[in-house]
């Protein structure tokens, strides 16, 4: 299954991912980075070269986990700029667009997960199990 990713989304996710990894585990951030979260973001960053191929639902879940953490970090950056600078300041507007691009990507990843879940249910006659989320492969 392919999830599209525009240039603007790649740039926003890379910026947010690097910032998350740099600050996500620190005490100043309210987005704590447990090891699974850090690993999800770290595994997402090298994949940001264009559209993403998702082979299993487990892959989709890991991708969603990383994207969700980046989106939350970008939301916090944007909120801080609104409060400390000004809602219409150039940096605040840029932070909004980073957040919005990452959020749009996350929405498509969530949709892919819903489609994968539905396909597994149709093909197997039951909800996805830990086994099927790892072994049921989706073509591009």
Image (cartoon, rainbow, N blue to C red):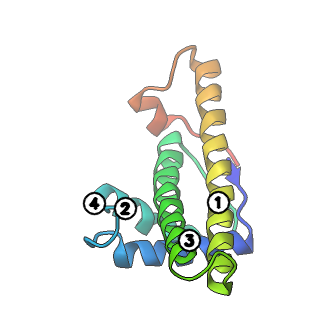
Density class for disc 3 (Cα within 10 Å; few <14, some 14-19, many ≥20) is many
Density class for disc 4 (Cα within 10 Å; few <14, some 14-19, many ≥20) is few
Instruction: Say whether residue 59 is left or right of residue 93.
Output: left
| Residue at the spot of label 3 | 78
Mark 1 touching mark 3, by CB under 8 A?
no
Is residue 24 visible to us here? Answer: yes
Mark 3 touching mark 2, by CB under 8 A?
no
| Label 4 element class | helix
Question: Which mark lies nearer to you, 3 or 2?
Answer: 3
- The x, y position of residue 72, in whole percent, is 49, 60
Question: Which mark lies nearer to you, 1 or 2?
Answer: 2
| Label 2 element class | loop
How much space separates mark 4 and mark 2, taking CA atoms? 12 Å
Density class for disc 1 (Cα within 10 Å; few <14, some 14-19, many ≥20) is some
N-terminal-most mark, 4 or 1 = 4
How much space separates mark 1 and mark 3, taking CA atoms? 26 Å
Is residue 138 visible to us here? Answer: no
Q: Which mark is residue 31?
A: 2
Instruction: Say whether residue 115 is left or right of residue 31.
Output: right
How much space separates mark 1 and mark 2, taking CA atoms? 25 Å
Report which quarter residue 101 is drawn in.
bottom right
For the point 54% across and 43% down, which residue is it?
56
Mark 4 touching mark 2, by CB under 8 A?
no
For the point 65% across and 70% down, which residue is it?
96
How much space separates mark 4 and mark 1, taking CA atoms? 23 Å
| Residue at the spot of label 1 | 52
N-terminal-most mark, 3 or 2 = 2
| Residue at the spot of label 4 | 35
How much space separates mark 3 and mark 2, taking CA atoms? 14 Å
């Amino acid at each position: 299954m392919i999830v599209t990713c525009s240039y603007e989304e790649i740039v926003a996710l890379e910026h947010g991912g690097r910032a998350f990894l740099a600050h996500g585990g620190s005490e100043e951030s309210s987005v704590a980075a447990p090891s699974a979260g850090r690993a999800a973001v770290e595994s997402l960053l090298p994949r940001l070269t264009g559209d993403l191929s998702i082979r299993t639902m487990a892959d989709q879940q890991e991708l969603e986990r990383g994207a969700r953490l980046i989106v939350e970090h970008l939301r916090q950056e944007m909120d801080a700029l609104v409060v400390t600078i000004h809602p219409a300041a150039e940096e605040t507007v840029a932070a909004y667009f980073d957040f919005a691009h990452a959020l749009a990507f996350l929405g498509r990843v969530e949709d892919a997960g819903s489609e994968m879940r539905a396909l597994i249910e149709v093909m197997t006659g039951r909800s996805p199990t830990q086994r099927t989320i790892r072994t049921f492969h989706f073509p591009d």
